[in-house]
Structures are given as C-alpha cells and as structure tokens.
Amino acid sequence: MLPIGLAAAPSEILTPKPRDAVLLTLSGPQIQPLLNPGDVLEAVREAFVLHSQRKGRIFPVVRERLDTGGIFGIKSGDVQSQALLGFKAAGFWHSNRAIGGEPHQATIMLFDPASGRPICIVDGNAITTARTGAAGRLGLELLARPESTHICVFGTGVQARVQLDLALDLLPQTSTVRYITSKGRPDPAFEAAFASRCSLTHETDPDEAVSESDIVITATPGNGPLFSADAVKSGTHINAVGTDTKGKRELPEGILPRARLFVDDREQSRQIGEGQWLKEAGHEVEIGSILTGDAVLSRQPDDITIFDMTGLALQDLTVGRMLYRRAIEGGYGTQIAWPW
C-alpha cells in the first residue's frame, strides 16, 4: 500500500489503517541526492502559479524575535485540490556560527489533510536554499534585461552563492561580478567558488559597485540599507532576498517609488518584506500573475525593477512534496512507525 500524500487529488489517496501508519523522515544528507535544480525550479514555478490562481492558500505568517537572540517563524498553507497541506518552521540564530553551525534553521512537515496525521518531516535548510535560489532565477528570467553583463552581490553566504550561481547559469555572458561583504574584507572562499566563471572583484564602495551593475542581488540579514537610491541607474534589476521580518530592510529610502515592484505575495511584502517601507502600496505585481499571463510585463529599457522575495509556504510545500515522492519511489529516508 502506498503511503498517503503521494497522490495529486484526494480521490486517489490510499490512507493506511491507523495501526499501519508511518512517518517518513528525510535528513539533510538524505535529501541532497534528490534536489535536482530543474525539478526545484518547476516546483517553485508551480507554487507561484497556484498562488496567483488562488488554488493554493497561504496562512498568516508567524515571525517573532526570541529572548535567545534568534528569530522563529512558521509559514503554512495548503492546496486543497491536490491534498497538499503543511508548514515550515524556520528562523535565524546568529549565535550558531560561534559553534560552527548554520544560522538558518528550518524544518518542513507534510500532513494528510483528511486525517491531520503527519506523513513526512524534512530538514528544510537545503530546501529553503534551493527554492529561494529558484525564485531568484525566475525573477531574473522574467524581469532582468537579457543583455545584462554586470552583477553586484551583497553578501557571500549560502544564499548569496546560490543566487549568483543560478544567475551565471541564466546569463553566461556575464563579464563582471562585484561583491560587497559586511566586514569590508575580501572573501577568498567566495572568490574561489566563482573564479572560473566570471571576473570577480571585491568592492568597498557599495554605491560605486551598484552604479556599475545591471543586476543587484542583496542576500544579507537585512540590518539596514546597503546602498543609496541615487546609485541605482536606469534599467537595473534588483533581487531583494534578505528582508523577511518586520523592521528589516536592505533597500534604501527612495528607491521603491522609482521602481516597478514585483513580489511573491502582496500581503507578505507589506508585512515583512521591502514593501513594509513603501508609503503607498497597491501597485505591486505578484510574480505568479506574470507566469500565468494574467499580468502582462512590458519592461522598458529604463525601468528599474525589484523582485521582493519574502518566500511562500507554497514553495516549501511543492518542493517538499516532490522530495517526498522521490524518496518513496527510490527508497530514501527513514520510515518510523507512527500508529494512531
């Protein structure tokens, strides 16, 4: 008998008897062989389309600062027509670096919507990295000028690396990448990772780096504006990755009114994304509506475009489901008896 949740529609679900129920767990090392970038991209594209068509629901986001110094959040949602239900509990614990750990921590759970029983627990760190990277690639594919050759990256962490990696795949003609670090010092490991793919230069003047770039990628903890609005030239596209909590920001005052703002979700952008700093909201365009054709994108050469990426629960769920199916088919993961 197949485990529940493998089917695409409620009528196809084969629910084990309570005494036969199992819970599949997938650790980080167990999911790495299953994270095919092309499949992740398609799952993320599906998530944006489902959201735009309102076939997928996202529930109110929990995002709270803790006394420990960490930030804890929950993103959840469902796709009723596909029997897809679940959440991601995630956050950021800066102090983890002191013990050699990853600051970003995430766990994804999928449930059987017919009974409420959990069917899969997945380490969400790699999923978050991959699905955010895929969203960034879609943003570049849809919004950046195809002839772009100069990229500026703020940050050299995990997300900065995956964003740049996918940008270089999409735009192989890239000739120059300028990068800025929070401490103002070069990052030899970051440079070594991309040395064979582009001309990489560490910059200490953020405004100069931005002014010379066609694409700007901000992948930082969102502690404040990274450059001045005047540094952004006409025609620039910005992938804003790091702002995901109330009070955070990466973009400067004055840039949003000059730009065309694209978001994964309007409400999330206004609540926890760069949109919270927009005085007059209402003109944001959801990226999913471009993918469905409900919104027509007519990018002019001088347009400044911004993709504010707050991250949708549906991205985590569609990627999580893809991994669950692959794990069942290939015998990956660990099954635990979970009778009820």
Image (spheres, rainbow, N blue to C red):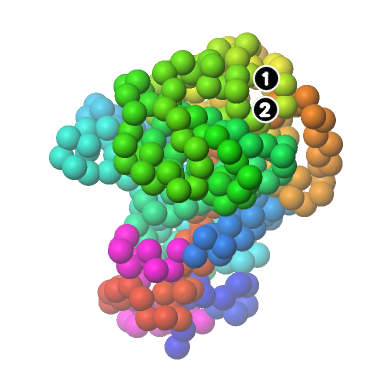
Viewer-proximal residue, 243 or 168?
168
Magenta segment: 14-35
Tell me residue 30's x, y (percent): 33, 67
Asked whether the residues under the numbered discs 2 and 1 touch, taking CB atoms below 8 Å apart as contact, a structural biologist would say: yes
| Residue in view at x 45 percent, y 63 percent | 35
In the picture, the disc for residue 59 is none
The residue beneath circle 2 is 236
Tell me residue 178's x, y (percent): 49, 30
Tell me residue 272's x, y (percent): 51, 29
Asked where in the image residue 332 lies, by quadrant, the reply is bottom left
Residue 261 in view here: no
| Residue in view at x 46 percent, y 35 percent | 200
Whether residue 185 is situated above or below residue 127 in the rendered picture: above
- In the picture as drawn, the residue positioned furthest to the bottom comes out as 1
Q: Does dot 1 land on a helix, a strand or a loop?
A: loop
Q: Quadrant of the C terminus?
A: bottom left
Tell me residue 206's x, y (percent): 49, 18
| Residue in view at x 22 percent, y 37 percent | 97
Would residue 16 be counted in the magenta stretch? Answer: yes
- Amino acid type at circle 2 is Thr
Crowding near pointer 2: few (<14 within 10 Å), some, many (20+)? many
Q: Does dot 2 land on a helix, a strand or a loop?
A: loop
CA distance separating discs 2 and 1:
6 Å
The residue beneath circle 1 is 233
